[in-house]
């Protein structure tokens, strides 16, 4: 068939000559093909016309002498290639948008690149200053280009300097659209990682100050990519060594150091760095290679030495005067403490949507991380002395310090001073007492006889919870209806009959506290209820798919009845009511209760019942197993014979 002409538009009907050659016979037939049809459907029609089996074994070929076969990807690539060059901005924008989507397919990418489509995108970017181009078109252009280049079909080194400068200008400009900056940073990152020459070229165009400015924005994709881009461009600096030497000089004032030769001065530095507690005496910067905490540990050490100079000097000199095995290493302790604080405070981790930890102390102090470090590094020295620790006990000391910090933060101190007082009051002896109490409590609750007692009590307590749930359903609850516009305006009431055989429900007024059963017009026999659905499985949640928020989704439940075609849909007023109703309906259906409220209540009841049962056994050690039954006596002469009558 002849190649498509420039006037080709999808959806129009064209007449093509199709030549099918056989070994002995050739035939020509005129076919009418609709371009919107899939190519496989067109081939199947042709094969059916000649009664040829296996249409998957055939393909269409251009009749211009070139061995080029028509494929879906090739046809799509040709359409988009022409659409991008269209003078109509709407067609061009739609084509670029579609290109960004389909370029993830490697087959399409090969077809499009074979037509020099990537060069067309490069030209669009290079000429963007001369054209009145919208941000949307430029975003789609860069996105499509990035997807094509990700396949590795074309080398990054083939790009022109004009293109690189244009991409860099998008990053350097302050008023550039955020989506354009994001894709531009992504492209520059790939350039930097692919070639050293491109790295040098990008380095000349992008300033470190501009990248840092991007990090200060609140758009996390840009921040994320900037961090990756900063990593290969961060050259080695002498600043770290200078800071470490300033730490040493602040601790050990040596007036005669300048008069020493190079070898003796180097030996003196190594000796003093050892006293500071660094593992690598000759190059202490190697101790800071690990990330986290990396250079954050160095920053906190410098802050402590500069802000609390006396405390810093006292820490270092006090431990320098001890024996080598009893000295607390400042450098090693600082690095480990910074890591502990990062883990406890979740520094460096992405924000959690479900996190519930809240520390008021963060809002009472500037530079809280550094101030916490200053308090806790002195706590380490204090705990070290209380434990009479040696170098071999370093990990044990840090475990105790972690526990001291965690327990103190769990009390939610509102100020740094309050934190300092509490953490210092929680000394090593107090930690031991708390550990002992928790261990004894755990042993009591995990002892085999206690576990067996729990299992015996559980059925009785579960039955108590079941009755409470049914009583709650008999009292009834006011629910809100959700209209098609997601408005919760109308009210209705539902309650279980006292004999647990009927669910009565009907509309209610807001000022009505608890309508009587007679006032509720509708009812459903419990025997007709077939199932209980929750969350997104509910019919009223499926009707509004994509519109419901998570809060409503967590409160939705439905009961199905008859032949599972009808349902009664609920939106609980609170999570507590949701748990009460789903548990109660599960009891009516003969199923197990599964709500978190039931598990919590069962644990509380079991704990109270166990404590009451064990009151008489206070200070009595509960054995792991029952005592052995003694052997029977050799005779029973000690027994009184009541059969003999008294004389």
Image: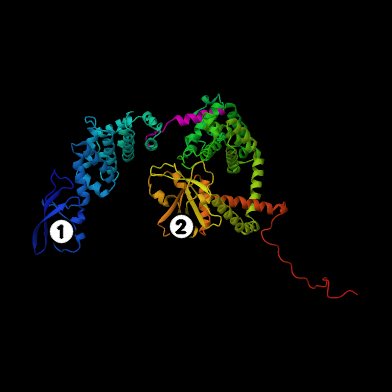
Identify residue for label 1: 46
Q: Is residue 210 magenta?
A: no
User: Which is more toward the observer, 330 or 482?
Assistant: 482
Q: Tag 2, which secondary structure?
A: strand
Q: Tag 1, which secondary structure?
A: helix
The vertical placement of 51 against 511, above or below, is: below
Residue 269 visible here: no
Query: In the image, 441: left or right of 531?
Result: right
Query: In the image, 70: left or right of 473?
Result: left
Are there few (<14), some (14-19), or many (20+) residues within 10 Å of tag 2?
some
Q: How many marks?
A: 2
Are there few (<14), some (14-19), or many (20+) residues within 10 Å of tag 1?
some
The vertical placement of 520 against 449, above or below, is: above
The residue located at (33%, 34%) in the rendering is 181
Identify residue for label 2: 531
Residue 354, percent from left and from top:
48, 43
| Residues at marks 2 and 1, CA–CA distance in whole angstroms | 53 Å
Residue 304, percent from left and from top:
55, 30
Residue 467, percent from left and from top:
58, 55
Image quadrant assignment for residue 216: top left
In this picture, which residue range is highlighted in magenta? 232-251
The residue located at (26%, 36%) in the rendering is 137
Residue that sits furthest to the right in the current view: 647
Residue 299 visible here: yes
The vertical placement of 120 against 264, above or below, is: below
User: Which is more toward the observer, 585 or 496?
Assistant: 496
Q: Main secondary structure of the magenta part?
A: helix
């Amino acid at each position: 068939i002849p190649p498509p002409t420039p006037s080709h538009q999808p959806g129009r009907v064209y007449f093509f000559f199709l030549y099918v050659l056989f070994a002995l016979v050739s035939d020509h037939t005129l076919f009418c093909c609709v371009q919107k049809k899939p190519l496989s459907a067109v081939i199947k029609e042709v094969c059916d016309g000649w009664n040829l089996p296996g249409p998957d074994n055939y393909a269409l070929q251009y009749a211009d002498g070139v061995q080029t076969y028509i494929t879906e990807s090739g046809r799509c690539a040709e359409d988009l290639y022409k659409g991008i060059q269209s003078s109509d901005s709407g067609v061009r924008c739609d084509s670029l948008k579609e290109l960004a989507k389909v370029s993830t397919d490697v087959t399409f990418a090969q077809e499009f690149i074979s037509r020099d489509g990537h060069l067309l995108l490069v030209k669009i970017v290079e000429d963007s200053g001369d054209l009145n181009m919208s941000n949307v078109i430029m975003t789609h252009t860069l996105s499509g280009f990035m997807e094509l280049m990700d396949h590795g079909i074309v080398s990054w080194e083939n790009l022109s300097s004009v293109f690189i400068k244009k991409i860099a200008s998008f990053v350097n400009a302050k008023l550039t659209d955020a989506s354009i900056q994001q894709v531009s940073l992504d492209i520059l990152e790939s350039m930097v990682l692919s070639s050293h020459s491109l790295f040098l070229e990008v380095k000349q165009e992008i300033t470190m100050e501009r990248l840092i400015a991007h990090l200060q924005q609140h758009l996390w994709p840009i921040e994320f990519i900037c961090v990756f881009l900063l990593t290969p461009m961060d050259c080695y600096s002498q600043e770290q060594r200078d800071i470490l030497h300033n730490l040493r000089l602040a601790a050990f004032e040596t007036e005669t150091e300048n008069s020493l030769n190079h070898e003796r001065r180097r030996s003196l530095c190594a000796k003093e760095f050892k006293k500071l507690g660094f593992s690598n005496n000759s190059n202490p910067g190697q101790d800071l290679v690990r990330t986290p905490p990396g250079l954050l540990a160095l920053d906190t050490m410098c802050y402590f030495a500069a802000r609390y100079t006396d405390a810093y000097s006292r820490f270092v000199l006090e431990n320098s005067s001890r024996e080598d095995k009893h000295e607390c290493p400042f450098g090693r302790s600082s690095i480990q403490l910074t890591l502990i604080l990062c883990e406890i405070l979740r520094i460096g981790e992405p924000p959690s949507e479900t996190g519930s930890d809240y520390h008021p102390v963060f809002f009472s102090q500037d530079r809280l991380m550094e101030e916490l470090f200053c308090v806790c590094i002195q706590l380490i020295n204090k705990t070290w002395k209380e434990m009479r620790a040696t170098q071999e006990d370093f990990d044990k000391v840090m475990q105790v310090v972690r526990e001291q910090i965690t327990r103190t933060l769990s009390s939610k101190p509102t100020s740094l001073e309050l934190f300092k007082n509490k953490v210092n009051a929680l000394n090593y002896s107090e930690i031991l007492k708390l550990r002992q109490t928790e261990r004894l409590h755990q042993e009591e609750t995990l002892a085999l006889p206690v576990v067996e007692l729990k299992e015996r009590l559980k059925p009785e307590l579960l039955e108590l919870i079941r009755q409470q749930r049914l009583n709650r359903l008999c009292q009834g609850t006011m629910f809100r209806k959700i209209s098609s516009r997601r408005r919760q305006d109308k009210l209705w009431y539902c309650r279980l009959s006292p004999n647990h055989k009927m669910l009565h429900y009907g509309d209610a007024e807001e000022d009505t506290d608890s309508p009587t059963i007679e006032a509720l017009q509708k009812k459903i026999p419990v025997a007709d209820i077939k199932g209980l659905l929750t969350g997104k499985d509910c019919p009223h949640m499926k009707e509004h798919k994509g519109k419901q928020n998570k809060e409503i989704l967590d409160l939705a439940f439905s009961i199905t009845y008859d032949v599972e075609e009808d349902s009664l849909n609920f939106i609980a007023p609170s999570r507590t009511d949701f748990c009460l109703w789903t548990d109660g309906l599960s009891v009516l259906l003969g199923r197990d209760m599964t709500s978190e409220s039931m598990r919590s209540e069962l644990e509380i009841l079991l704990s109270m019942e166990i404590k009451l049962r064990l009151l008489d056994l206070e200070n009595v050690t509960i054995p792991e197993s029952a005592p052995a039954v003694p052997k029977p006596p050799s005779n029973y002469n000690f027994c009184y014979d009541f059969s003999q009558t008294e004389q």
